[in-house]
Image (cartoon, coloured by chain):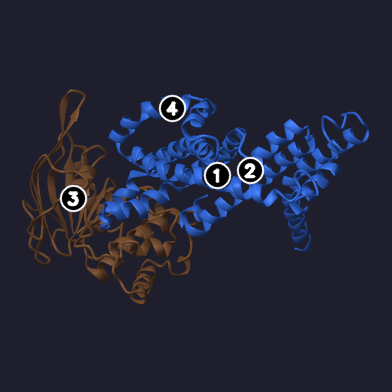
Chain colours: A brown, B blue
Amino acid sequence: MRSPLRAVPGGRESHGHKILEIAHLRKVFPANGSFLTVLDEISFTAQSGELICILGRSGCGKSTLLKVLAGFLTPTAGKVLLKGRPVSGPGPDRCVVFQEDTLFPWLTVEENIGFGLRGWEKKAKAAEVARFLGLVGLSEFNGYLPGEISGGMKQRVALARVLILQPEVLLMDEPFASLDAQTREEMQNLLLSLWKELSHTILFVTHDVNEAVVLADRILLMGKDPGRIRENIVVDLPRPRRRESDGFLHVSSRLYGGLRD
Amino acid sequence: MNTILKVGRKAAGMERALPWLIPIACVFFWMTVSSTGLVPTYLLPHPLEIGRAVYTYIFGHPGEGAYAGRFLDDAAASLTRVGGGFAAAVILGLPLGILSGRLAAVQKLMSTTVNALRAVPGITWLPLAMVWFGIGIKTTVFLVALAAFFPIYLNAASGARQVNPLLLQAGAMMGIRRVRGTFAILLPGAMPHILTGLRLGLGISWAYLVLGELTGVPNGLGAVIMDARMLGRIDMIVVGIIIIALIGRTTDRLLQTGMRFFFKSARRMT
């Protein structure tokens, strides 16, 4: 029997070509007179079409890492290359789904989804927005305002408004953390089906072991003080993954152990 | 079902009547004290007399009486002054406010000056304004603009400051650069505060209009009030007050409706 779990020293050329390359990344913040190293020696690569989860406890710097990749923060040292070109500043090639509600409250669901589409002919734009409304299952809610829909629905809109821009890499910062357990599971399934259909490269930050095991091709386990990638774990479980299966439990108990040390 | 509908309709009727309850009660009270002679008419004329004065003021022909038919001229003069002063305050206050809400340097640059000037009561500027601009439209427009500037500036600044930075980050990652972000994210996000500032500014514009017109300009609603005092026409003072109240409320409504018509953010967030 093949073990569902393998620790691999570097990245693995399993999917397509190398799309994102992070080398010797370091982020230091000045903190009351001294310096706080939040990220240190972060190196990994992501292949196109890969779904990578960055798993760590709160305060390990995983969100900071995502912000650096998104371009909201500049690294102190090291480099981030997207398709071989260095990243400078935020841009629609690396879209973010935030944990918080960041929809524009004065725009309807469909206006939010079409917000980033510019230079499109009106009809084509409407059709594209309608397609993505359908993909996230919100066709009937096109005219609602964000204040009128639930938290889960808001995250669907947040997902649709970035997927429509066809980013090279989708960055997700604990996007489902504030949802109830059932909605969270629904959203995970939705993300997986969208990923299957649109085959994006996804970097997904979470502190939830089960979430990581359900989603990831590969899990980067982060340690704290300073934030480093401690392990690079390929999850070979067949999809769809059942939470009760032996393989699932095996991987998750291993990860729980990893988080504790 | 039927009962619910009925109750609903009753509640809606109630809601529509509620704002008029106090004005109607006041008029009723006023009529009582005037009719019974409790308050002598040389201090406060009877409401019917006021009604007649309003009618002559608006619909009368010049020559019929001292104030007959002057309404349109006076209202036009006053609206021009309020409009001019308010527009100047918006043109200066809104962009400066937004800038100072977003840029620490602008905020630092402006804060001492704005707060010092704000501490000076607007009326103190009157003598200086009269020396500078003489008696007439310029003085009034200057006073109105000066007074309306502060609420517009301060509310725009706090609105811009309170826009969720994540919304701007979200815009940036969707490829929205600074200029478009300002119009597509920052201004709509600050809209509730901006609208509050505009309404406060417009309200205070009417107050300073009267102040400006007290200086002896020949026409305008404030001028009528001052003129009537000197001629002992108490009824016309009251008429002036009532008309300013009505026009003030109407312009406030127009401002709100206009903003809601033109801006999604005003329509959907206020």
Q: Which mark is residue B81?
A: 1
Residue A154 position in % (x across, y down): 41, 56
Which one is nearer the viewer's eye here, B106 or A213? B106
Q: Chain of mark 1?
A: B
Residue A108 percent coordinates (x, y): 45, 61
The answer to whether residue B155 is seen in the rendering is yes
Question: How far apart are the alpha carbons under marks 4 and 2?
Answer: 28 Å
Whether label 4 touches label 2, CB < 8 Å: no
The residue mark sitting in front, 4 or 1, is 1
* Mark sitting on residue B220: 2
**Residue A99 seen from this side:** no
Q: Which residue is mark 4?
A: B117
Q: Are marks 2 and 1 in contact (CB under 8 Å)?
A: yes
Disc 3 target residue: A89
- Labels 2 and 1 within one chain: yes
Give, as a three-letter code, the residue at label 1.
Arg
Q: Looking at numbered disc 2 in the image, what kind of residue is underneath it?
A: Gly
Crowding at mark 4 (Cα within 10 Å: few <14, some 14-19, many 20+): few
| Mark before the other along the chain sequence, 4 or 2 | 4
Left or right of residue B17, residue A121 in this image: left
